[in-house]
Image (cartoon, coloured by chain):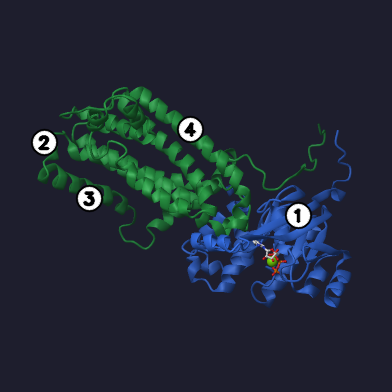
Chain colours: A green, B blue
Amino acid sequence: MTTETTSVPALRAPGAGLGLLDVFRRRHLLALLVRKEVQIRYRGSILGWLWSYVKPLTQFAVFFVALGIVLRQGETIGYYALYLLSGMMIVTFFTEAFQNGTRSIIDNSALIKKIFIPRELFPVASTLVAVVNTLPQVVVVFVIALISGWQFSLGAVAAILLSLLIITVFATGLGMLFGAVNVAFRDAQSFVEIIGMCAVWASPVLYQWHLVADRVGEGALFTLYSINPITAAVELSHAGFWMPLHPKNGLVLPNLVPASLAGLAIAFATLLLGQFVFRRLEGRFAQDL
Amino acid sequence: MLKTSEPARTDAVVVDGLRKTFTLRHTHSFKETFLAALRRKPLTTQFQALEGVSFSIKQGESVALLGYNGSGKSTMLKLISGVLSPDEGKVLTRGRVAGLIEVGAGFHPDLSGRENVYLNAAILGMSKKETDALFDDIVAFSEIEAFIDTEVKHYSSGMFLRLAFSVAIHTEVDILLIDEILAVGDEPFQQKCLARIRGLHDAGKTLVVVSHDLDMVSNLCQRGVLLRGGSIAFDGDSKEAVAMMRAG
Ligand SMILES: Nc1ncnc2c1ncn2[C@@H]1O[C@H](COP(=O)(O)OP(=O)(O)OP(=O)(O)O)[C@@H](O)[C@H]1O
Ligand SMILES: [Mg+2]
C-alpha cells in the first residue's frame, strides 16, 4: 500500500487491456467513433437523414403492392407487408452489423497500426452504427403497426427490445470473431457476405415458420432451426409488432419464450467466443495489416 | 510501502531483452503458395527487426533514437506504445503514453477541423472535459482558426499537419514518443513545435524522439541510443551517438 497520494503509477506492459471492459471505459471515444460514421453517411445529401425513413417506407410500399396485392400473399397472411418488414428489419440489422464488424479492423488499419487503443472499440462501434441505422426502420414499422391498430402491451414491447438485444449481442460477437480472422484471411469477408445472403432464408422472414415444421417435423431438425438466434429475434419482432394486430393466420414459433432464451444464451456465448478469439489474435493485428 | 521519495529518478520505460521478429510472406495467393510448396521454396522467412534490446529511460529524460532506415526505430516506438507486442523480453512503461508515430492517423477527411480535434484527442486518450479545456489552445497553436469549421479535406497539407500536430502535442501525457514528425509545417511552425517540446521536457515529461535531422535531435535530447540492424550499437551522449552514426 502506498500512503502517498501523489505516488507514481506502477510500471505496466503497454497494450495490455481488459477487452470489452475497456470499451466501456473509453465510451467517450466510442461515442465519437459512432458519431463519425453516422455523420459521414449522409454528408452532402439534401434529404440527409430523411433517407433512412424513405428506404423502409419504399420497401413497405413494394411489399404491400407487389407481394400483398399482385401476388396475393395478403389473402393468406394478414398484414402481410408488416409481417415482412418487421422480420426483414431484424435480418438487415444483423447483416449490416455483422458485415461492418467483420470489416472494422481492416477498415481502421491506419489507426490500429499507429496508435494503441482498445481494438474491440471497432467491432463494437460497427454494431452501434448499425443500431443507429436501424432505429428509423423501427420507427417506420412501429408507426405502420400503430396505424393498423397496434395496442400497447408490456409483452409486445419486451419482445421487441429482446429481439434487438439478441441481434446486438450476437452480431457483436460474430463481428469480433470474423473481424479478427479477416486480418490474416480476407476470405472471412466474402464468407460473411454469403452468410448474410442465407440469413434471410434461415429464419421465417419471407415465409412462416410452420412451412419448415411441415417439411421436417417438429423434431431435432426443427429445434436446430428454431434455436438460431436470428430466428428467435425475427419471431420476437413478429410477436411484438405483428401479432398484436390479430392477423389472419397469425402464428409465431411455439415455445417462443424458451427459444428466445436459448437464442440469447447463444448470443452471449458467441460474444464470449468472439472476445476470446479476438484476444488471441489481436497481438498480430498491427504487424499483419 | 513503496519508496516514492525520488519520483523524478524512477524508470519511465524499461525495455529488457526485447526481441521482435516479423514473418515475411513470399506468397500472396493460394496458387503461389501451392506452386512454391511444390518447388520446395520457403513460403516465409523470419526477419529479426529487434534482437535482444535492453535499456531503460528515467522519468524526465529525453532520448534520441537514432539509426539508418530500417534499423528498427519505429518498431521500437510501436512496442513502447503498445501497438506491437514483443515476441520475447518485455517492455514496461509508467503513466500515460502517447505515441506520435504519425500525426493525423485518426483524422477523417470528411469531418471538420473541430470534429477531428475532438475525435483525435479522444483517440489519444483525452476525455471530453480535457479536450474542452484545451480546445482553444489547440486551435490557437495551429493558427488555422479561420478554417476550423471547414472539412479537413479542403486543408492544405501543411494546415492538416499543423492541426494534427497541435492536437497531439497538447495531450496530457507522461511519456511522449515522437517519430519523424518534427518536419511538419514551415520554418516558424517547426521552431514553435520545438519550443513546445522543450517546454514539455522542462515540465518533466519523458521524451523519446526519432528523427533524421541529426543536429536538431542531438540538441533537443541529452541522451542518444543508436540502433544498428536491430540491436543497440551505442547508448550515451547524443552528440557522441550522432558522431558515431556519421562515422558509419
Ligand atoms: N509489420 C511488419 N511486417 C514485416 N516487416 C516489418 C514490419 N514492420 C517493420 N518491418 C521491418 O522491420 C524493419 C525495421 O523497420 P522500422 O520501421 O522500425 O525502421 P525505422 O528504423 O523506423 O526506419 P526509418 O528510418 O526508415 O523510419 C524494416 O526492415 C521493416 O521492413
Ligand atoms: Mg520509421
Chain bearing mark 2: A
Residue with the mark numbered 1:
B19
The amino acid on which the numbered mark 3 sits, given as a three-letter code, is: Thr
The nearer-to-camera label among 4 and 1 is: 1
Residue with the mark numbered 3:
A58
Residue with the mark numbered 4:
A268
Residue located 81% across and 60% down the image? B62
The amino acid on which the numbered mark 1 sits, given as a three-letter code, is: Arg
Q: Residues within 10 Å of mark 3 (few under 14, many from 20)?
A: few
Residue with the mark numbered 2:
A75
Give how far across and how far down residue A206 sits, in percent: 24, 40
Q: Secondary structure at mark 2?
A: helix
Q: Secondary structure at mark 4?
A: helix
Is there any visible trace of residue B143 in the rendered image? no
Give how far across and how far down residue A265 sits, in percent: 45, 28
Residue located 80% across and 62% down the image? B231
The nearer-to-camera label among 4 and 3 is: 4
